[in-house]
Amino acid sequence: MIHRANKQTVLTRGLNNWQVLAFSAPSVGLMFLLGPMSIVQGVYAKYFGIPLTTLAGVLLLCRLFDVFSDPLMGYFSDRYKARTGTRKPFVLVGGLLLLVCSYFLFIPPNDVSTTYITFWMISFYAASTLSSIPTYAWGGEMSTYPEERTLIFSVQAFAGKIGFLLFYLVPFLPLFTTTEMTPETLKASVIIAAVLMLPGLYVALRYAPVGSPSRENKIEKKKKASVSFLEIISAFKRNKPFQVFVVAYMCVGLGMGMYFGLFFIFVDSYLGRGEDYAKLVSLSMVAGLISVPLAYKAITLVGKKWAWGLSLLLMVLSIVYTGQLRPEEDVFLSLLTLKIVLTVGTAILPVITMPLLNESIDYGLLSNRAERRGLYFSIYSLLTKFEMALGLALGLAIAGWLGFDATETNHGEASGFAIRMAMSWIPCVFMCLGFFFIWRLPIDERRAGIIARRLAARDLRESTQ
């Protein structure tokens, strides 16, 4: 059961199912809004004539902005949590702003300019940061036990997959005359996102517990000392598990960013199967939903590192196979097969990475007591967006430089070489490099349990002093 010191603070183990579900409720709407970000560059290129190299530059500029915004958001989220005991206002404001920004980004004017795209894409990602970083930190604070955290983030990942699936079902609504991803699809998505997001935010803010009290509160009461930003950077440098996690995640994310950024263009423009894209993703998302609870069971049996390795193997195999497809072939079944395999692999990732990140944060807390979970998650959020956008921009740039044109309907061998190089061959190199660092992660299930027990014992000693 849950024992409370007051109405706002969960102190011990034992979240009930409703609380875990309530925390995950906003993820349906959030992931529904993030779904279009994998195809919006293709829509801008095909329907508004924006060059791929221009879109690559816009994405890189957005990521430069995140270099400053993400750590600051984590820093202020931690400070607010230390003073008030909650991160919920950040989640609420970020979710509402995300809806506003999605309206302008997904429903552009006919004469859309590069400046317009840049401004609203930066605003969209800033709002996402405002919501996601406090949410990740909040989830890690809801329990101090590794097994329970794995369950929390598994349910959150499952809710997110539902959001993605719902987005890719939008083209099948009777409102549209085609199942292709078009500007009209994005317009309808904004309205549906609001219907999903607003009730989800209410449920989470009303029923999900705020989590454990900030350890920084306890220390400040005793030492009355503040923590400088340089001390925070120093703490990160001493956290080897976090450093290895970052490198592994960066390598995998770069490869995924290149692949996902070009997959819609590959299917729609190169293979000429744009009408099948929503059907492919929708069917594969069903497999992804099924794989999330299976991934949770697998982690409990073989551990997170083995599960991450299996996830990466499935993704590499599907990406390699994608590079073998040609437009003159009947490729629907092949696309469906590889997309299902890829989706199962990617569905495992959030179930693994969130608990692994929390364990590396707990390791840092053993040597440095101030609570910096928000800052750690801000770095994770920055890496997630930066690596995906950098990979996407790199893929778009390489494809464009090698001569691929998304507005063309017939593509020769040179054009095929360009998109296969950018979407399949180079990403596999990055992901195989990530595989090497995954096996160098120093924290396993046994060590995670030891860290959790030591932190719990230290908190108990301090609470009795």
Image (spheres, helix red, strand yellow):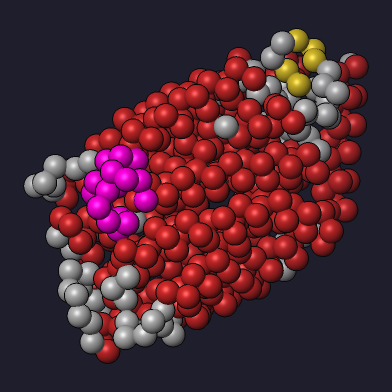
Image point (61%, 34%), residue name? 24
Residue 86 location, quadrant = top right
Residue 315 location, quadrant = bottom right
Does residue 399 show up? no
- Inspect the magenta stretch and tell me whether residue 276 lies in it: no
Residue toward you, 177 or 289: 177
Image point (32%, 70%), residue name? 273
Single out the residue that lies furthest toward the bottom.
Answer: 413
Residue toward you, 202 or 132: 202
Image point (76%, 21%), residue name? 10
Q: Position of residue 128 (x, y in %)?
A: 43, 38
Does residue 442 show up? yes
Above or below, 395 relative to 175: below
Single out the residue that lies furthest toward the top.
Answer: 6
Q: Position of residue 1 (x, y in %)?
A: 86, 23
Left/right placement of residue 431 relative to residue 46 reads right
Left/right placement of residue 400 relative to residue 91 reads left
Residue toward you, 349 or 364: 349
**Picture quarter with the C terminus:** top right
Above or below, 358 relative to 17: below
Residues shaded magenta: 172-189
Residue 87 location, quadrant = top right
Q: Position of residue 21 (x, y in %)?
A: 66, 32
Q: Position of residue 424 (x, y in %)?
A: 44, 77
Image point (32%, 76%), residue name? 271
